Amino acid sequence: MVVVRVVVFLLGAAVAVAVLMSAIRTVVLPRAQRVKLSRAVFLSVRSVFDLRLKLARTYEDRDRALALYAPLCLILLPAAWMAITVGAFTAMFWALGMGSWHRAFAASGSSVTTLGFEAPVDVATDILAVVEAAIGLGLIALMISYLPSIYSSFQRRELAVNLLEVRAGTPPSAETLIIRHHRIGLHDRSDVLFRDWEAWFADVEETHTSHPALVFFRSPLAGRSWITAAGATLDAAALMSSTIEGTNTPEAQLCLRAGFLALRKIADFYGIPHDPHPSPDDPISIDRREWEETVDRLVTEGVAVKADRDQAWRDFAGWRVNYDQVLLSLAALVVAPYAPWSSDRSARLHVARFGRIRPLRGN
């Protein structure tokens, strides 16, 4: 019986340490790490939300439902930490001779909540109660400190998304952005926009991998999304670097590189497959006809385009191939609203599990 109690105590201690390390990796560690417990919570809740989405008749219904997804997971995550901690310490209290499992559970719950309704029986259980109380308070403190960081990053992200609506419309499109810049005389001064979005992509890469719940935080308005805004900006930079006369600026190209690197890092975190070294000749989701139609509309608006359209198309496709696959996959992952050249074709993808994306049948 002594051996059994020793084994149970060690197992409980191992589980308690694992939960504590999971919380530290999730909240404190300033780098991207895939934490199994956090992943399990998000996947379990997503399975429930997927059932709810099947009943939604419109995108607005889906958006309202999914708006609760990430916040609910953030509330359930510390609840999972606490529940597992109570279970682990219940095993340890029982192993130290607290009597029945019921009494051990009461001692564990009393300690983690610091209510003190079940007193320890000796020095060993006194020490265990103090340790559990410290862990419980620490987990709550970690989550309290975690939330302000999450919402601060969310506000920075959404400020740029909101400002882009002024230039690129809703839903955002590269075509609208270029035309508006041309109409108001900013056509040759887009370098400021791309410099700002280069910094935005760097910030999103860091925050959305360190705090992966941010990927699923939805914009306040149903028609906005961080991923469609990113797609519109990257497409505008690609068009200006390949197709529009006199706009091949270093800022646009740096924005493109910052953008596709950021999206790839986020995709890597979720295990979304992509080619890290695509060839400029690899196929993309936009065909030559769509690109030609966009270029024709730009010409109609008075935007000067390069005379050699064959070379311009090759250059555009060569830029787009760097982010085409990850852009569509992330748009499918977050169930993004309609936007041309991004979520409008991500509907052909179905995200069954985080990081497992497969084509839908019949598409």
Image (cartoon, grey):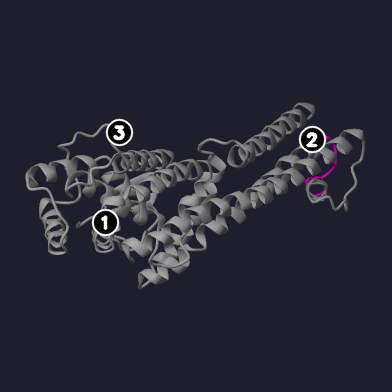
- Give the residue type at disc 3: Pro
Q: Secondary structure beneath disc 1? A: helix
What is the spatial separation of the Cα atoms under label 1 and label 3, in whole angstroms?
24 Å
Q: Quick one: 258 or 120, which is closer to the camera?
A: 258
Which mark sits nearer the N-terminus, 1 or 3? 1
Report x, y in % for residue 79: 65, 52
Disc 3 crowd, CA 10 A, few/some/many (<14, 14-19, 20+) = few
Q: What residue is shown with label 1?
A: 174
Figure quadrant of the C terminus:
bottom left
User: Which one is in front, 164 or 153?
Assistant: 164
The residue carrying mark 2 is 95
Residue 126: x, y in percent?
89, 38
**20 or 248, nearer to the observer:** 248
Provide the secondary structure element on which disc 2 rests. Answer: helix
135 or 142: nearer the viewer: 142
Say which amino acid is labelled 1.
Answer: Ala
Residue at image location 56% in from the left, 58% down from the top: 71
The quadrant of the image that shows the N terminus is top right
- Residue type at the position of mark 2: Ala
Identify the disc placed on residue 276: 3
Q: Residues within 10 Å of mark 2 (few under 14, many from 20)?
A: many
Name the side, left or right, on which 215 lies relative to 234: right
Mark 3 or mark 2, which has the lower sequence index?
2
Residue farthest to the top, as pictured: 3
Residue span colored magenta: 95-104
